[in-house]
Image (cartoon, rainbow, N blue to C red):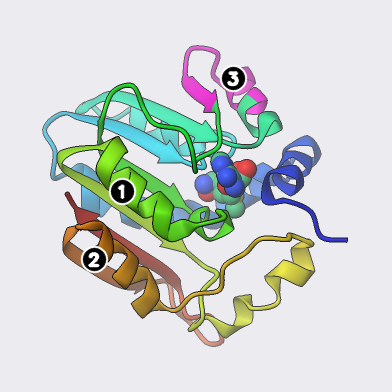
Amino acid sequence: MKRSPTTVFSEWAEEGRDEKMAKGHEAAVSNMLDGVLKNYNSYRFIDAGCGNGWVVRLVNKEPNCKSALGVDGSKRMIEKAHRIDPKGAYLHADLMSWIPEKRADIVHSMEVIYYLPNPKEFIQSVYTNWLAKNGRLIVGLDFYMENSSSHSWPDDCGISMMHLLGEKEWIAFFEDAGFQSIQSRRFGAKESWAGTLIVSGIK
Ligand SMILES: C[S@@+](CC[C@H](N)C(=O)[O-])C[C@H]1O[C@@H](n2cnc3c(N)ncnc32)[C@H](O)[C@@H]1O
């Protein structure tokens, strides 16, 4: 029987698979951060679906970072983040309902939002409730329609909720939410791998 994303990822954290996952995401995330962080002299950063919090620890080292917060719905992932970095800011919460106390300039999310019950509603909530003016949402996605080698993942990983959408649908979610200067690109494409789909927009 398939299980919820946060149940499966809690198990991954217990088994240490979070570290291998972080390694696998490293190159795409580095490309995402390189394109975004340089646009702000001082910024508040949120990693939506932070896993063990590795991106928060990376961004906290940047001189222009005012604050970095990681949010994840897996209790085990957040416990692990606190264990690795007791002074860091990590929060256990459901991204569909959580709203930050302080608005962010950058909301980053790698390999998360297709697991949410309603990705369109989440993107709208980031626009309306999470971001400061001129703030930016940037998401990285490996599971999408044009990347056919990812289509077996729901069965491979035994995860019940994974929305398989195309690049145009993701861009439309950003447009409908009100984002401006929307960009999409694919990072790291090679034979039988369409690359990480990276979509971003500015409020
Ligand atoms: C593939 S992992 C990616 C983790 C991290 N971004 C990384 O690159 O290592 C997806 C993460 O999304 C989280 N997640 C899934 N659904 C969620 C929800 N509704 N609320 C909060 N987090 C959720 C999972 O717990 C998991 O840690």
Q: Quadrant of the N terminus?
A: bottom right
As measured in the structure, the alpha-carbon distance from the residue carrying label 2 to the one carrying label 1 is 22 Å
Q: Are the residues tagged 3 and 1 within 8 Å (C-beta)?
A: no
The residue at 33%/21% (across/down) is 101
Residue at screen point 66% across, 49% down: 20
5 relative to 122 in the view: left or right = right
Q: Which residue is mark 2?
A: 175
Tell whether 103 sits left or right of 114: left
Q: Nearer the viewer, residue 76 or 16?
A: 76
- Spatial separation of the CA atoms under disc 3 and disc 1: 23 Å
Disc 3 to disc 2, C-alpha distance: 36 Å
Number of other residues with Cα within 10 Å of mark 1, as a class: few under 14, some 14 to 19, many 20 or more: some
Q: Residue at x 79, y 42 (%)?
A: 11
Q: Which residues are magenta?
A: 79-91
Amino acid at pointer 2? Glu
| In the foreground, 99 or 38 | 99
Nearer-N-terminus badge (3/2): 3
Coordinates of residue 61 in the picture (x, y in percent): 33, 27
Query: Is 12 drawn above or below residue 82 in the view shown?
Result: below
User: Considering the numbered disc 1 on the image, is that residue within a helix, a strand or a loop?
Assistant: helix
Task: Report which quarter residue 76 is drawn in.
Answer: top right
Sequence-first tag of 3 and 1? 1
Numbered badge on residue 191: none
- For residue 82, the mark is 3
